[in-house]
Amino acid sequence: MARVALVTGGTRGIGAAISKALKAAGYKVAANYGGNDAAAEKFKSETDIPVYKWDVSSFDACSEGIKKVEAELGPIDVLINNAGITRDTAFHKMSLEQWSAVINTNLGSLFNMTRPIIEGMRARKFGRIINISSINGQKGQFGQVNYSAAKAGDIGFTKALALETAKAGITVNVICPGYINTEMVQAVPKDVLEKSILPLIPVGRLGEPEEIARTVVFLAADEAGAITGSTLSVNGGQYMA
Ligand SMILES: NC(=O)c1ccc[n+]([C@@H]2O[C@H](COP(=O)([O-])OP(=O)(O)OC[C@H]3O[C@@H](n4cnc5c(N)ncnc54)[C@H](OP(=O)(O)O)[C@@H]3O)[C@@H](O)[C@H]2O)c1
């Protein structure tokens, strides 16, 4: 029987690449998204992967959404906590709303998504939880106190939960992408990218979403049971933690 994988923010950018790679590897995949119906419908028609709309910053919405996915596809074996947002600004100008939106979406979502799923994984003695953090959670970033705090929190969450679930056959790992070639990064002006960003990346190029997806497929495998609590950097050598 194919294992079931749920990818939050799985309809665009890195998440879409993860959803497609898991499907290609033989998983039954569900892709969650937050609000961009047009992108989700396009993704669904191109990939034939079912899409589910709910807000990962709401615990109740996650519990309802997970119930629906499990009713339609079966119990979730693999959870990819990928959905994330930015609300960048210098800290002395940051509003409580900008702080809370990023903390609730990028860190609160790990509780909201994982808590309703973990008991089933424990009972079935199998689970793969893969969290998508960021290089900026490892090293900090100007204008991203909210984002760096949330992404660093994702790493702590991963390590603590990995300890708690190791004996139950559940692994928990975190991937820290560097600059990845998604819409978010494509929006950066070309000269800023060439003069200020690429020189910081030893491999001399952006990462591709498929390179993050490949790492996810590696960690999700049944054969990856001894890899838990690890932080994998996929950043072209930009930061070696
Ligand atoms: N791109 C990079 O260079 C980079 C680098 C390091 C880390 N990351 C991390 O990688 C992850 C994916 O980034 P990306 O660049 O692929 O982002 P993206 O292209 O902006 O896509 C974000 C995805 O998350 C979904 N999402 C956002 N808020 C949500 C919410 N409240 N509830 C449910 N879904 C929500 C979006 O849904 P809609 O389509 O409905 O909006 C979309 O599917 C994020 O956690 C990001 O922080 C990215």
Image (cartoon, grey):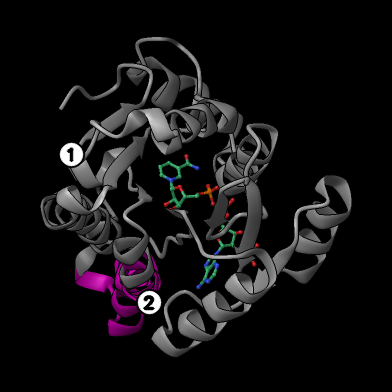
Residue 218 place in picture, x, y as percent: 44, 28
- Side of 88 relative to 21 (left or right): left
Using the image, determine if residue 7 lies above or below residue 98: above
Residue 171 place in picture, x, y as percent: 28, 45
Using the image, determine if residue 220 lies above or below residue 236: below
The range drawn in magenta is 92-118
Residue density around tag 2, few if under 14, some if 14–19, many if 20 or more, within 10 Å: some
- Side of 155 relative to 117 (left or right): left
Q: Residue at x 81, y 46 (%)?
A: 47
- Side of 120 relative to 45 (left or right): left
| Towards the viewer: 186 or 235 | 235
SS for tag 1?
helix
Using the image, determine if residue 26 lies above or below residue 67: above
Residue 229 place in picture, x, y as percent: 18, 41
Most extreme residue toward the top, as rendered? 203
For label 2, being within 8 Å of ligand 1 is answered no
Q: What's the mark number on residue 139?
A: 1
Asked where in the image residue 153 lies, by quadrant, the reply is bottom left
Q: Residue at x 38, y 76 (%)?
A: 116
Q: What's the mark number on residue 116?
A: 2
Asked if the residue at tag 1 contacts the one at tag 2, i.e. Cβ–Cβ closer than 8 Å, the answer is no
- Look at label 1 and name its amino acid: Lys
6 falls in the magenta region = no
- Look at label 2 and name its amino acid: Pro
Q: What's the mark number on residue 200?
A: none
Task: Tell me how many marks there are.
Answer: 2
